[in-house]
Amino acid sequence: MSILFAASEIYPYAKSGGLADVAQALPESLREQGETVYSLMPLYNQVDRKKYNIEFSGLSFDYWLAGVRHQFDIFHKADSLDELFIYNPILCDRLGLYDDEFGDFGDNALRFGLFSYAILEVMIRKKLDVKTIHINDWQTSLVALLAKTRYNLPQKVVLTIHNLAYQGIFSKKVMDILELDWDTCFKFSGIEYFDNVNFLKAGINYSDAITTVSKTYAQEIQTPAFGNSLDETLRINSFKLQGIVNGISTEVFNPQKDEFIEKKFSLKTYKNKQKNKEILLKELALEGNEKPLFIFIGRFTSQKGVDLLIDSMDLFKDYEANFVILGSGEEFYNKIFTEITNKYKNIHIKIGYDEAFSRKLYASADFLLMPSVFEPCGLNQMISMQYGVLPIVAKTGGLKDTVVDFTDIEDLKSLKLGVGITLGELNLFWFNHAIAKALSLYGNRPKFIEISKHNMSVDNSWNNSAQEYINLYK
Ligand code: ADP
């Protein structure tokens, strides 16, 4: 069976969040299980063509939309020809993927509309023998609409919603710019959304199957509280919606091989984890190798519980513990974190996106803070567990499905899920209550180490979920 997998970001070529990790790891796992997967992403300026051996594939074509000629050049990886890249200047010649310091790019509808057309054109022009097209989030959602209306293709289209909060909502003028048919598409059961267009809504309505990235989130998004105004559309389409939990690449996130960490470690060489911590603390001028280390890694946006984190700083400073925060995001939060960067002796804040530093943190930390307001799946908690970290999580979405509170465990040995601390409620009291619980657990070294080692041996790989996708693709 062959699958066309399209995403707006794929690790390691371009990454702004979890989508890139999934778009790398799921195709990798499907290929390992014997499936043919063509992956497709934009060849943004920032993709390092030389480093990744990306070359012109020999296919170039023009596509006319509303009287405008758009040119596409198709590239592939020299050593992996089914990894394809689409170059078009409007789509790719940017300093960011979707936005820059001034905000979202004003022509994202055109950019990802062009990308969606190009995905189908590449499949057709390259005569790829594809059974199922797997699209991801709003950036590739128009593929479903185009495949079912303009192109009338026989392929099954599967849409994965990685985060319902981002929908691609634009003015209805986009209908003409992208030559979308008003009569068949601009309706409640199509792309129309409060007299605008909503790309994700089109994806939901026109695809044959929809997945989202955890079982709990699949339920949550059908409710007004988590539905981001698409809960009704999702309830109508619930017959084709299911939750399939994400995995992580155990090749990329592997403390035995991680190129970014100083002391590689495994269950057998567990003591090296402490050495990583000592190296890191020294580097950051934090004191107390024997104290627990708490980390936060993520986008600075309200979804990730950043408000709670900021409100907690004045309490964190008095704990016998160190805290390292790595992230960047909304200007409002970047500014607050910048202002307090050097305020506390036991809190180190780094603003920016830094893959290498994130791995050092996972390798050194004892606890990961993840007080998300909502979390479709969340990868950080799974990644951290690979490195023996105990996640402290809100009981929402994928966090609820992947982490059990250590006080709720009956038999650790037979437990297939990871272990950490779950927040009773999402507020300052429960968050700090969880940290107090963490401090007391850390004081019981044998128990802490037993749980940390358990987390390292939990299977968070893609193996099971990839099989679920294979069943769905048929
Ligand atoms: P998101 O909602 O951002 O997609 P996920 O938990 O699904 O959240 O995935 C986040 C991914 O991005 C993880 O691989 C995490 O380590 C990484 N990440 C997030 N912020 C940063 C950062 N500032 N620097 C390095 N890696 C980061």
Image (tube, rainbow, N blue to C red):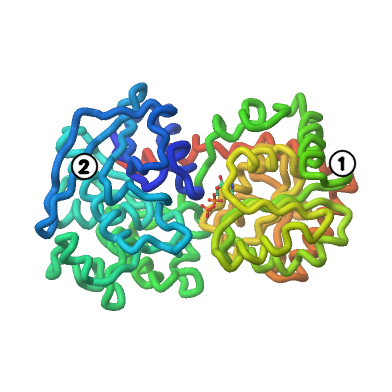
Residue at label 2?
A: 72
- Look at the picture and state if 94 lies above or below 78: below
Asked which secondary structure carries label 2, the reply is strand
- Look at the picture and state if 217 lies above or below 282: below
- Look at the picture and state if 457 lies above or below 216: above
Q: Is mark 1 within 8 Å of ligand 1?
A: no
Q: Left of 194 or right of it: where is 72?
A: left
Residue type beneath disc 1: Asn
Q: Which numbered disc, 2 or 1, marks the residue that appears first in the sequence?
A: 2
Q: Is residue 1 visible?
A: no
Locate residue 299, reporting x and y percent: 57, 56
Q: CA distance from mark 2 to mark 1?
A: 54 Å
Seen from the viewer's position, the closer of residues 101 and 298 is 101
Q: Left of 224 or right of it: where is 345?
A: right
Residue at label 1?
A: 289
Seen from the viewer's position, the closer of residues 452 and 362 is 362
Residue drawn at (14%, 44%), measured in percent from left and top?
62
Asked which secondary structure carries label 1, the reply is loop
